[in-house]
Amino acid sequence: MTRSTNITKIILSTILFVYFIFAIQPWNLYFLNDDFVHIPLSAKTQWIHFQFFRPVANLLTAAEVKLFGTNSLGFHITSLLLHIFSTFCVSILCNQLIYKYGDQAQYKNAGFVAGCLFFIYPFHSEPLMWIIGRISMIATLFIIISIIFFLKRSQHSFYYLLSLLSFVIGLFSYEITWVVPGLVSVITLVEYLKLQKRIKKEILYLLPFWILFGIFLLLRHMVLRQLITEYEVLGRDMSVFSLVANFFRLLARTMVPPTQNTIEFIVIFSATIFVLLGFILFIAKRRAVKLLHVLLVLFLIISYLPTIAIGIDTHGSEGERYLYFPSVFWILLLTMLIYELSGKIGTYVFFLIAAAYSLLLATSALNYQHASHVAKNILSVFNNRPAFKKIIAINIPANYRGAMIFRSGFAEAIDWMYPHMNVDTIIVVPAKRTYEKISLPVKIIKKEDLTAHYIKASTSDNKNYTLYFKNRIIEYNSTQDLLIFFNETGVGEVLYPHP
């Protein structure tokens, strides 16, 4: 990798930032799915949401509601700022790891390279573009800060205290922080074995992390009355085979984009692994495998443990919030491998990866922008409308190519965005399939067209209807109730009450 001047860094950073903003388009993003559930709860200063004990993230969201109300742009700007700060910390972490375990002359400007790749890494869609999904970003930020200061622990006791403080804040943000004691244990072991540091002193540094983690688990159990929640284990296959399969799904999705075809996904991942293993054998033959490489591989493996029971979707972007933390170590490892290439070849590989990441990021952003337009358009049917007795939403889009829309949160969205309506009943039947295309805007139909629009309906008085949809029987009054329906082709229709 050739040396970069400060001017080159500024130019490249500016280009990436401008591209990132126009690719993401935060002004075209909206609230999605259970944003409508958790944001109003945070606004009511409820720090325990169902089975989730994440008060730090809830506190941030509550502050945003005070500042921005129901203006989604403010929330997405906050997410952007968090990502920028995380990118900056990834760069610092890279430099700190090189300082401790690498060759600063060989890896000159590696922190900048890692920061660039992390900033435009394309599989950050959920934490970047789904407000509630950024919870993994918040926790990852505190994990990185904790590791950075732990690496500097011997320089000043203040750094060590900051490491512990960041760890504690992360614990109250998201469950992925649970692996921090394991990460610092690996660092301690490595420094004892390779750098011959005094083991007693290192154990004294390590013990407070495990003690604080134990205290946190005890507090969590007291608050939630359970240690592991149903969300994390209920209905999930905890067999060794399933956990191993989930590990490889997470690993694969860290490296390659989702595809609709499983075979195609496996082929792409296999080809990527083949190239990666070939390159690893190449540097092993040159005896260029370093302690830093091994350490990053261990960190990457550990980073998957908190979500290994959940896994990730290989057909869409659902679950990409679970990749934000592992992507830190993947990007650092990828950067180190790029630096093992000679001169211009390394530079070409960097720009090739950056170009591919940029295009994939833009594609993912388009999905979330469309999902946002759909959610906003659906809710717009309630603008300037009188109160309804009942709202019935049938086959409402759950997601668009992995970008959540209303798999949950529709009823809560109405309560939050239109509190004056005071609807008696809201019935929601989300679509089970992913729409490949959703037509906008939602069309207004007439009462006499009801039975011609893919809903089986019967009536005795042309006023009270019985709707039949996928084993659901729903009573509908055409003079009091509002009906929203999406057919199988993704066309939305709304029928307003007709007095």
Image (cartoon, rainbow, N blue to C red):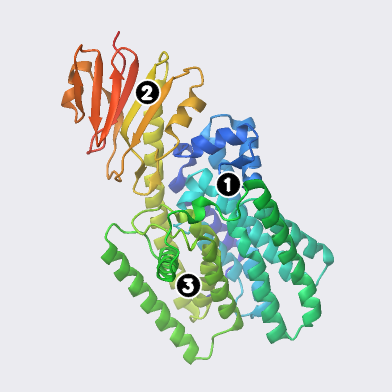
Q: Are marks 1 and 3 in contact (CB under 8 Å)?
A: no
Q: Is residue 80 visible?
A: yes
Q: Which residue is mark 1?
A: 52
Q: CA distance from mark 1 to mark 2?
A: 29 Å
Q: Mark 1: which secondary structure?
A: strand
Q: Which mark is residue 34?
A: none
* Apparent side of residue 454 relative to residue 476 in the rendered image (left or right): left
Alpha-carbon span between mark 1 and mark 3: 44 Å
Residue in view at x 79 percent, y 83 percent: 198
Identity, as a three-letter code, of the amino acid under mark 3:
Thr
At horizontal 49% and vertical 56% (from top left) the residue drawn is 233
Place of residue 205 in the rendered image (x, y in percent of width and height, measured from the top left):
78, 71
What amino acid is at disc 1?
Answer: Phe
Binning the other alpha carbons within 10 Å of mark 1 as few (below 14), some (14 to 19) or many (20 upward) gives some
The residue to which callout 3 is attached is 347
Q: Quadrant of residue 211?
A: bottom right
What is the x, y in percent for residue 183?
Answer: 64, 70
Q: Secondary structure at mark 3?
A: helix
Vertical order, 409 against 209 (above or below): above
Instruction: Tell me the kind of residue under disc 2.
Output: Ile
Where does residue 330 sit, x and y in percent of width and height? 51, 68
Which of marks 3 and 1 precedes in the sequence?
A: 1
Which residue is nearer to you in this view: 407 or 133? 407
Q: Earlier in the sequence, mark 3 or mark 2?
A: 3
